[in-house]
Amino acid sequence: MTNRNLNEVIIGKLGKTHGLNGLIKIIPLTDFEGRFDSLQEVFVGGNLRQIENVAHIGDELFIKFKSIDNRELAKTLTNKILTVPRSQVAPLDEGEFYTFDIIGCEVFDGEKKIGVVTEVLKTGSNDVFQVEDADGKEILIPALKSIVDEINVTDKKILISGYENAD
C-alpha cells in the first residue's frame, strides 16, 4: 500500500487507545510486522513523531509516542495512517515486488496494451492483478509464472502471455 506521496509508504493505521498512558493499537498494513520493533520515528497523518516504545500485548501491537502521555492526547491520533520514507522499506528477494510498485504498471500481451494495474488482490493462493483497460473495463489477471513473463517496476511495465481473458 502506498500513500499519494510516492516518497512515503503506508505501513499501518492507528486504532483505539489502550490504558491511560497514551498507548495506541497499531493495525499493521505491511507484510513485515517486525519492522515496528526497530522504528524510532514514523509519520503519523503526515507529521513526524518520535516513538518511545512498541509493545506486543497478546497478539496485538501497540505504540507509545514521545509527548503523548495520556489517553486524551492518544485519542487524537486514532485512525491516522502511519508511513515511512520509501527509502526505509524492507529489502525484497529477487523476483519479489511491493504492491505499491505493481500498481500503475502498464500490462502488455506482446505489443498489445491490455491496460493499467489498479489493484493487486490477495487471494491466498496467488495474487491477482486488477487491470483497467482503455474502455474502463476491469480485467483480472492471475499473477502466475505461467502468465506473467516479466515485471519491470522501473519502467512500470508487465509483460504477459497465454492469458485468454486479456483479449
Image (tube, rainbow, N blue to C red):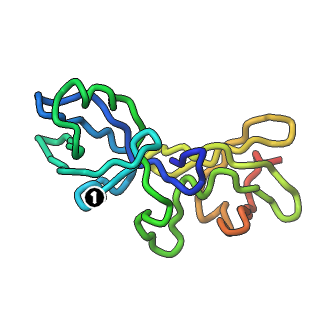
Task: Please state the horizontal and vertical placement of residue 73, each as a whole percent of the image.
Answer: 25, 29
Question: Picture coordinates of residue 91 (x, y %)?
Answer: 43, 70
Q: How many numbered marks does the figure carry?
A: 1
Q: Residue 55 versus residue 135: which sits nearer the camera?
A: 55
Q: Nearer the viewer, residue 141 or 100?
A: 100
Question: Can I make out residue 29 in this image?
Answer: no
Q: Is residue 115 above or below residue 22?
A: below
Q: Is residue 155 visible?
A: yes
- Residue beneath the point at 59% across and 59% down: 144
Left or right: 46 in relation to 107: left
Name the residue at 25% across, 31% down.
Answer: 74
Q: As shown in the figure, which amino acid type bears the numbered disc 1?
A: Gln
Q: Is residue 34 above or below residue 29?
A: below
Other residues around mark 1 within 10 Å, as few (<14) / some (14–19) / many (≥20): few
Rendered residue at 29%/51% (across/down): 50
Residue at the (60%, 65%) spot, across then down: 145
Classify 58 as above or below 163.
above
On the image, numbered disc 1 is attached to which residue? 40
Residue 62 sits above or below residue 6 on the image: above
Instruction: Give residue 130's position: percent from left, percent from top.
Output: 65, 43
Image x and y of residue 121, in percent = 54, 43
Q: Secondary structure at mark 1?
A: loop
The one nearer the camera, 163 or 50, is 50
Horizontal relation, residue 136 to residue 31: left or right: right
Residue 144 lies left or right of residue 31; in this view the side is: right
Q: Quadrant of residue 45?
A: top left
Is 16 on the left or on the right of 57, as rendered?
right
> Which residue appears farthest toward the bottom when viewing the image?
94
